[in-house]
Image (cartoon, coloured by chain):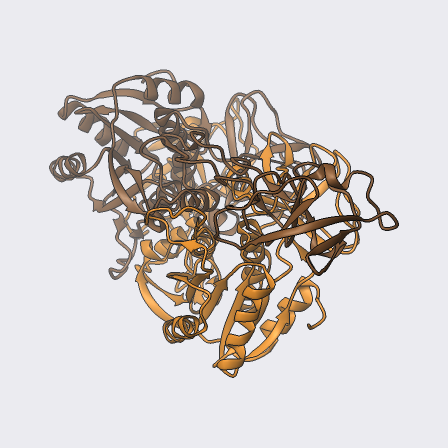
Chain colours: A orange, B brown
Amino acid sequence: MRKVISREEGIELLSREGEVSFKSQSLPLINALGKRAASQVKAPFDLPELPRSTRDGYAVNHLDLKGVSESMPAYLTLVGEIRIGELPNISISLGEAVKVFTGSYLPKGADAVVMDEFVEESHGIIQVYRSVASGENVLGKGEDWPKEMPILSFGEKITVGKVGLLAACGFDKVKVLEIKIGIASTGNEVLSPGVKLIPGKIYDVNSFTIYSLLKNWGADPWIYGVVPDDLSKLIQALEELLSESDIVVLSGGSSIGAHDYTKELFRRFGGQIIIEGINISPGRPTIAGWIKGKLVFGLPGHPVSSVVSARVFLIPTLEKILKVEGDNLLFLPLLVNLPSKLGIEEFVCASLNGRGVMPIWGKSGAIGRVARGGFLIRVPEDVEGYREGEVVEVWSI
Amino acid sequence: MRKVISREEGIELLSREGEVSFKSQSLPLINALGKRAASQVKAPFDLPELPRSTRDGYAVNHLDLKGVSESMPAYLTLVGEIRIGELPNISISLGEAVKVFTGSYLPKGADAVVMDEFVEESHGIIQVYRSVASGENVLGKGEDWPKEMPILSFGEKITVGKVGLLAACGFDKVKVLEIKIGIASTGNEVLSPGVKLIPGKIYDVNSFTIYSLLKNWGADPWIYGVVPDDLSKLIQALEELLSESDIVVLSGGSSIGAHDYTKELFRRFGGQIIIEGINISPGRPTIAGWIKGKLVFGLPGHPVSSVVSARVFLIPTLEKILKVEGDNLLFLPLLVNLPSKLGIEEFVCASLNGRGVMPIWGKSGAIGRVARGGFLIRVPEDVEGYREGEVVEVWSI
């Protein structure tokens, strides 16, 4: 058996070897939400294209209002109005103002807007009771998002805010990566949900948690189903999984026998095992390597082990391959003491609770711990537990 | 104009008046991810149904190993083996043990498992070098999730962990709420993304950000499109929106004129305006009420105002109607001083940055601020800003 390596080393090795390339497709903007961008997208024009008012008021040159106050108003000549959606075909000179609305473009010569509430208008003259700074109540040309600034980089997740920014720039479609990941569970004791329970058997959990994690991450996972511990059936399943996917994820019993099957599959397909065990708990018996140019993962069979390995190893490997940052980690105070073993990187099921994070105790087979929480506390290899109140690294599932 | 009320009061009023009922549909488990449960779902059986081993080892009665150590081993008779997926048809008496694997059921009479590494087996006798506690390395009957315990409650969001738990209980389908929310943007200056930009006009941002927020929340939003400021076209649009939706969300210019159109629509349809302005910034000019038994929201036109109003007012109203908790709020230290106005509840665009939260400065029309961050810092009405290092309430967008 190969040396068990650290999670970091494992991710490094897998993202360095071979080459994964993904297809892309153009999706309507709303369907791109949560997917991964297939290419860099830059702003095609300045947002806004010209300075706009952010208030209902009067566009002025701020120099005209220097030293103005309630007791010392300024008087300006109203030379027109620019409505929302109209081009700014008026210009002003010193001593002049133009009525504008929230969203109106500014006339040439104006550099600020004074709000309605500080102005009295009468017979083409406005009386202004307040000074303004240059740029006040104005969204400058390109101030929201400048022309040519990247909106999306390759592999980036398309968030609510990015959907909004893409719409603002007129995009109704966006090219996203199609990251096809085929998932199967192995084991004679495993049944697919929906079939009648046979006494002694258990339902497949891992296909569904791994699918959900990858879907939320922005990939296109699909579930092959349950494959019994039978080499010919495993070979047949893996052939279909490889032909229909860019990446294959098997999960199986963490027993020696189950691992032997996965290793035998690598041999039969002429693949190369790169990772055989990673120094994390739970999730240690994770295998990964290459078969026919495709990444193949063999995750542990225990439901919590497999979801942890997928979250902290498989997903960071995908992120490293795409050269993108992972999701925001949280740093939160622990609400109780958390013991842990030195020498292994631990991930402890947890929930957010008021102002801190609370471990969910229990055994690694218990999927209820993931269902109750949705977070993991990372305890690095060289840390022997944390005390209540210490700030710890928290990953969302 | 009605009194501007607090966000809390507004949510209370809207969730109290009238009655919203949603349809439901049965979805395959994987498609239910991220949706809202349409009914309570309880565990149909104990998980696990019988005690299971969480290790490869030997099932024993812990009493047999009392005081056992490396220098004082115990000798037990091996009476059989229970493989994974087999029913436990063996029972043991004191002095006996059964070989088990990770996931095997325990034989009757056993209450603990001693791991392989502490055992030597030879000619039907095992030599054990370690004592175990009752329940050690065993997942007890119902210890993961007991029979009848609710997995999902009505309106609850279906997470990765809950998908896993539903699978573990054999569910391949789940009933989810269909919360149809029709969205339209109004304004003569607004164009739909994808059409050629007409100078002076802007693209519709709000339909897309509101859609994305609601989709991520678990609703079924749809976008009607852009409606010009023309009463007959607005009436026609609202008729279609009402007939196809449970809830309608309009967003329009925050100018007085735009508001008049929304109010006129309430009058024309015999509706009732409940909220006219809420004491939040940005997002103050928010209108909401009932038309023909359906909730109708009129959100501000400014992109940031409208996304904030949707996130902190519309979504919490939905949550209150469903009687569900909101998403986890975060409490994180501020990385800089944050000034704010007394007397209004402010929501400041922000990003997570290392161990704290960082405001993103800028003007309320700038959707780039949402695109750059994805979080909001809440500053309550009675707080006049925060100092660097203070722990503040953070909402994700």
Q: Position of residue B224 (x, y in %)?
A: 21, 45
* Front residue of this view, candidates B201 and A334: A334
* Front residue of this view, candidates A296 and B262: A296
Q: Residue at x 20, y 43 (%)?
A: B227
* Front residue of this view, candidates A361 and B362: A361
Image quadrant assignment for residue A222: bottom left
The residue positioned farthest toward the bottom in the image shown: A270
Image quadrant assignment for residue B20: top left
Q: Position of residue B289 (x, y in %)?
A: 27, 23
Q: Position of residue B7 (x, y in %)?
A: 43, 23
- Relative to A252, B277 lies left or right: left
* Front residue of this view, candidates A118 and A162: A162
> Number of callouts in the render?
0
Q: In what quadrant of the picture does the N terminus of chain A appear?
A: bottom right
- Relative to B272, B81 lies left or right: right
Q: Position of residue B333 (x, y in %)?
A: 67, 37
- In the rendered view, would you say B191 is above or below A339? below
- Relative to A232, B379 lies left or right: right
- Relative to B31, A54 lies left or right: right
- In the rendered view, would you say A197 is above or below B315? below
Q: Residue at x 52, y 44 (%)?
A: A367
The residue positioned farthest toward the right in the image shown: B71
Q: Would residue A290 be visible to someone looking at this image?
A: yes
Q: Residue at x 38, y 21 (%)?
A: B10
Q: Would residue A98 be visible to someone looking at this image?
A: no
